Amino acid sequence: MSYLTRDPRSGIGSKASDTSRRNDALPHIDPITEAAAMTTLAHIDIGQDAGMNRRDFLKTGTGLAIGFIVTPNLLMHAVDARAAGGAQINAWVNIATDGTISIMLPSSEMGQGIMTSLPLLFAEELDADWSKVKVEQADVDSVFNNPVHFNVQGIGGSRSIRGYWPIMRLAGGQTRYVLMVNAAQRWGVPVEQCSTAPSKVMHRASGREMSYGEIAAFAKVPADLKQLTEKDLKQRSEWRLIGRDTPRVEVPSKVNGTAVYGIDVQLPGMLYASILRAPRTGRSALMMRKR
Amino acid sequence: MSQMTTTSLTINGKRQTVTAHPDTPLLWVLRENLKLTGTKYGCGVGQCGACTVHIDGQPTFSCLRPISTLENARVTTIEGLAPASDHALQKAWIAEQVPQCGYCQSGQIMRAAALLKNNPRPTRDQIVAHMKTNICRCAAYRRIVAAIERAVKEGVA
């Protein structure tokens, strides 16, 4: 798994379909991204121990795992992340039956706070109890690309919030809608009569409610799920989480040495490289000796 | 190849015996032999402070101390500062939301902890003068000083 934030398949600035530059002799190195690789958090364990690999969890864990396909016009198609037919959809969110909500951070926390703020956007529209939210680092996968930042998972230029603003909110809203649809179906009522409060769906008319964890135990992503757009999302006046000073989720790990940075990763048989520079400015290597 | 030697020392209260080339800086013994990666490599030449640990109670650049000089030394790293990560400085660091990227912060906290051990009531000027060995590219300096002052006010654990 690459811990660099840059998608090695597409390269900085190149379209996914542009293959002409990909096989050049030297990869294009973006100095900002390389600096980010050193300081970017590679992995965070927030709260619960991460004994189980996430892919294994998707196969064997209980609860609801939802992936999203982002179309070019930023519609979010929600799919069951454990879809039949072996299609492995990277889940953006896992809702466990105990109510724990694991939201993926699609990009890189570098101290700018997005490990908290991007999941917060998701949680706002999901109408999640923030105390039940866990943040996990997304895999390197083009489904998590930032359309405003070279269509990769990288960060820079204040583009994280700008780029993921519609995506995280729509994904959160879609997830909430999946939960509502499933609860409504279970209750035999129209979904339009349902509402949510943090981490629960309610049917006020009959006084019933169900927690997200309870729903996750049986929920399915309906094939004909209504497509939400930005106008279906909360108004600014309804924001419960956005705009409030929220303690950043990774700060505790940064004060006790447990936060893992790219440079901290040590793998068996790992190779190390150093840059060998020409002794004079402007000179370059004449030949390379291969061993 | 190169001659390896063994060194016995105490790290975070635990006796350890490590095998490494005698010139190996403590920083790399901590990070690679002992997998204590909380102590960070920033410059390797004693100019940034990211590698700061306590050696026999003194804040030290671990990038500059060869392991061969550390037989029977007592070393404390960020992981060993407080067993439950509840040193007054760590609590203050969270309350003040100090870290941004966080890379320099282990060194900052260890440097500050040494100050408070010797001087539990430093003035702001004393704090700033003491902390000059540690740099922060994210420039979280204001919050670093605020957290140290907060730890002073709320009592060092």
Image (tube, coloured by chain):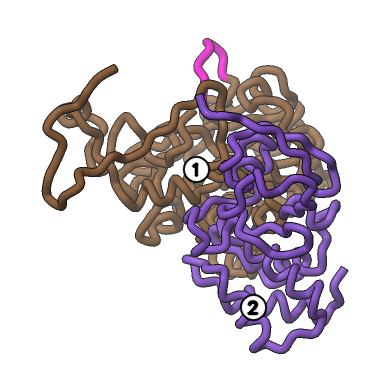
Give the percent coordinates (x, y) of residue A38: 46, 47
- What color does chain A have in the rendering? brown
Residue beneath the point at 78% across and 44% down: B9
Picture quarter with the C terminus of chain B: bottom right
Q: What residue type is labelled 2?
A: His
Using the image, determine if residue A233 lies above or below residue A81.
Answer: below
Question: Can residue A87 be found in the magenta stretch?
Answer: yes
Q: Name the residue under label 2.
A: B130
Residue beneath the point at 85% across and 48% down: B13
Magenta-tinted stretch = A83-89
- What color does chain B have in the rendering? purple
Subunit bearing disc 1:
A
* Relative horizontal placement of residue A51, taking residue B61 as reference (left or right): right
Give the percent coordinates (x, y) of residue A218: 74, 26
Using the image, determine if residue A176 lies above or below residue B75.
Answer: above
- Please name whichever residue, A13 or A225, is drawn nearer the observer in this view of the structure: A13
Same chain under badges 2 and 1? The reply is no
Q: Dot 2, crowdedness within 10 Å: few (<14), some or many (≥20)?
A: some
Asked which quadrant contains residue B61, the reply is bottom right
Q: Mark 1 points at which residue?
A: A106
Secondary element at tag 2: helix
Question: Marks 2/1: CA distance?
Answer: 39 Å
Subunit bearing disc 2:
B
